[in-house]
Amino acid sequence: MTKTQQIENPYIPEPARIVRHYDLVKDHRFFQVRHVDMKRAMSFTYNPGQFIMLSIPGLGEAPFSISSTPSRPGILEMGIRKVGKLTEALFKKKDNDIIYIRGPYGNGFKIDQMRGKDIIIVAGGLGVIPLRSILYYVLDNRDQFGRLFFLYGAKNPDEILFKTEFFQLKNRVDIECLYTVDVDTSGEWTEAVGVVTRLFEHLPEIDPSRSAAVVCGPPVMYKYVIQELLKLKIPKNQIQMTLERKMECGVGKCGHCVLDHLYTCIDGPVFTYWDTLHFRELI
Ligand SMILES: Cc1cc2nc3c(=O)[nH]c(=O)nc-3n(C[C@H](O)[C@H](O)[C@H](O)COP(=O)(O)OP(=O)(O)OC[C@H]3O[C@@H](n4cnc5c(N)ncnc54)[C@H](O)[C@@H]3O)c2cc1C
Ligand code: FES
């Protein structure tokens, strides 16, 4: 197979090199990877909210959200939790080792309808991984968006992902970062304590017709976060959520992710709140 064939056929896994990795928290690791073919690496583009299929030959393949932003081309970043066969093997890999990726897949966030608006990003736990992509996209294209609010909650301070970089963001004047943990026993946590919805108390007045929200977190979080966003009168089609389903192929062929007539791998993983009103099983 030639390199050109690989580029033309997005279903064929392409070799990528691990250029950097480090532990985010226990059993959660950050991976920075780059296509081995440098031209491909530089031309590879995607939307925040899309995912790739990552594989290790003989060990399997699974979807992972892209956590980097297309505004910083050349590398792809992921935050991965060790849960099973593939991720255990991945955690044994070292820098410079080769893995395989295909994609990008899925729809991603509707960025065009977010431009010019205030953006509220609400993340819970692992949900911050895909939202980190849109977060940096907005920061890298700051003049295209209104105010930016980043609300992030984790169970406890030891489970905050990307802690160093997210705390550095607090020094910027063009973003309001609000962080919380459900419980703090460390005594060193300086931010809020309580569930992520408590952070809405700290938001300034917003104009709902000029605001858009993106949400990702554990299933239990959506109901309560959406209640808060509806209290702010944000239109239902301006609330976007990224939702995970069991996926196999990622390209609408195997049927593993189908709900009613929706293929969550191609019609999602990003849905608006409006969509979920019609397909309640999505959440
Ligand atoms: C669109 C999308 C984006 C995603 N993005 C991310 C991401 O950014 N980061 C991330 O970490 N994950 C992400 N995931 C989830 C990831 O794809 C899965 O965790 C993947 O299955 C891991 O593969 P694995 O082979 O390591 O684990 P698997 O072996 O597939 O295990 C997956 C789950 O099944 C359980 N399990 C495994 N074996 C058994 C067994 N024998 N009996 C009972 N339970 C079992 C495991 O405990 C685990 O919870 C995403 C999923 C989707 C659909
Ligand atoms: S994962 Fe195969 S159809 Fe969606």
Image (cartoon, rainbow, N blue to C red):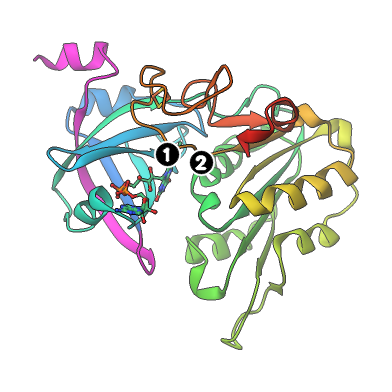
- Residue at image position (17%, 43%) is 59
Using the rendered view, name the quadrant where residue 235 is placed. top right
Mark 1 burial class by Cα count in 10 Å: few <14, some 14-19, many 20+: many
Q: Is residue 265 left or right of residue 22?
A: right
- Residue at image position (55%, 37%) is 137
Q: Nearer the viewer, residue 170 or 87?
A: 87
Q: Is residue 208 magenta?
A: no
**Labels 2 and 1 touching (C-beta < 8 A):** yes
Reply above or below: 123 against 67.
Answer: below
Number of marks: 2
Q: Is residue 181 left or right of residue 39?
A: right
Q: Is residue 243 left or right of residue 56?
A: right
Reply above or below: 151 against 270.
Answer: below
Of the two numbered discs 2 and 1 in the rendering, the one whose residue sits closer to the viewer: 1
Q: Which residue is mark 1?
A: 66
The C terminus: image quadrant? top right
Reply above or below: 211 against 188.
Answer: above
- Which residues make up the magenta segment? 1-28
Q: Nearer the viewer, residue 88 or 193?
A: 88
Using the rendered view, name the quadrant where residue 76 is placed. top left
Residue 233 visible in the snapshot: yes
x and y, in percent, of residue 147 in the image? 76, 43
Callout 1: helix, strand or loop?
loop
Q: Which residue is mark 2?
A: 133
Mark 2 burial class by Cα count in 10 Å: few <14, some 14-19, many 20+: many
Q: Is residue 15 magenta?
A: yes
- Residue at image position (85%, 61%) is 201
Reply above or below: 145 against 263.
Answer: below
The N terminus: image quadrant? top left
